[in-house]
Image (cartoon, rainbow, N blue to C red):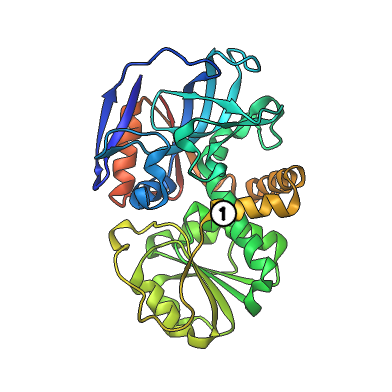
Amino acid sequence: MHQVEVSKDRIVDAQLVDRQLDELDDGAIRLVIESFSVTSNNVTYAVVGDGFGYWNFFPASDSKGIVPVWGHARVIESRHAEFAEGERVYGYLPMATHLDVFPGNVSASGFTDMAEHRQPMSPVYNQYSRLAADPEHDPVREGERMIFGPLFKTGFLIEYFMRSENWFGASQLILTSASSKTAMGLASVAKQYSPQIKRIGLTSAGNLEFVTASGLYDVVLPYDAVDSIATEPSVSVDFAGNSKLLNAIHTHFGGALKYSCLVGVTHIEEREGGTDDITGPTPTLFFAPDHAVAFFKSVGPKDAGNILAQSWRDFLSDAGDSISLERRKGLAAARDVFVEMASGSVDPAKGIVIEP
């Protein structure tokens, strides 16, 4: 098998490594990875790394890590009675060619990997969909699901959380890095479920045209135009990780900022910088897996799955064609794209799918 290993303390240092496949254990199935996307989300996994246990899902050596990705895989060997060779699944995968998993909680639509080393982490990442009975699966939209799917779900959960809190009394939603796929997902769900909330997207000058053309925002502004936004009661969701921008938003809105939410890191080069002296509410990190567990518990697994599937279809209708899919062959391509993204070179109008 082959896998991409990156240095934990310098993620742009990524190498293609060969490993020997061991004999498959009883109760396990072996997956060959067919395709996965590489997005800024994967860079975030690497940046926060050990802080959230992301390096623990697919272990390498102490100083190296394997970046998790979302994609499709096929069973090529089974030592589990409920799985046959040829079945296809979707879920959390390593940037590699193969993965062995130990299915538990098996149903027609999915299963959980019960591998011992994965149990301390959020169960959200250990769940796999069996495509033959998956309400979200559309064979024509597999590329979009890999690129947008996990990010869209984070956006969905942010909207659900904000709506559950009555938007903290706000009438405006300020989104940084508005070209990011998570921000677009949040904007789409807010448009569907909270149309009374004005959606204001902040982005770089170079992405203004792309973000405006998406049709997901009521207003699109460059980062240096924060001071032009009306100081009405607002909530902010920061995807950029730029402390100067976040301070500018807090300073401009002051007491009118009712909640400050931090999600991911898209401006990798500007992620440093504290917020100890920031004006207004304390910025609060949004950890999507915890909110996903709460959402499924509150609504029930079946209804939650159907709600997500419908919102996903609505999002595809809104913005599914906003990016062009680009398929690249081989793990070396995955390594190159990841390094490019970690270095800050991301074209929001392009979605990269790797076929190892």
Q: Is residue 86 above or below residue 279?
A: above
Q: Residue at x 59, y 22 (%)?
A: 88
Q: Is residue 257 above or below residue 130?
A: below
Where residue 24 sits in the image (x, y, percent)? 46, 14
Q: Quadrant of the C terminus?
A: top left
Residue 215 seen = no
- Res 139 → quadrant: top right
The answer to whether 182 appears left or right of 64 in the picture is right
The answer to whether 354 appears left or right of 173 in the picture is left
Q: Is residue 10 above or below residue 200?
A: above
Q: Residue at x 49, y 84 (%)?
A: 253
Q: Residue at x 38, y 27 (%)?
A: 96
Label 1, on which residue?
Answer: 290
Q: Assign a secondary structure to mark 1.
A: helix
Where residue 21 sits in the image (x, y, percent)? 37, 16
Where residue 6 sits in the image (x, y, percent)? 28, 38
Q: Residues within 10 Å of mark 1 (few under 14, many from 20)?
A: few
Residue 328 seen = yes
Q: Count the labels in the image.
A: 1
Q: Residue 309 or 324: which is nearer the viewer?
A: 309
Where residue 233 sits in the image (x, y, percent)? 59, 82
Q: Residue 280 or 151: which is nearer the viewer?
A: 280
Q: Residue at x 65, y 55 (%)?
A: 294
Q: Is residue 127 above or below residue 292?
A: above
Indicate the amino acid at tag 1.
Asp
Q: Quadrant of the N terminus?
A: top left
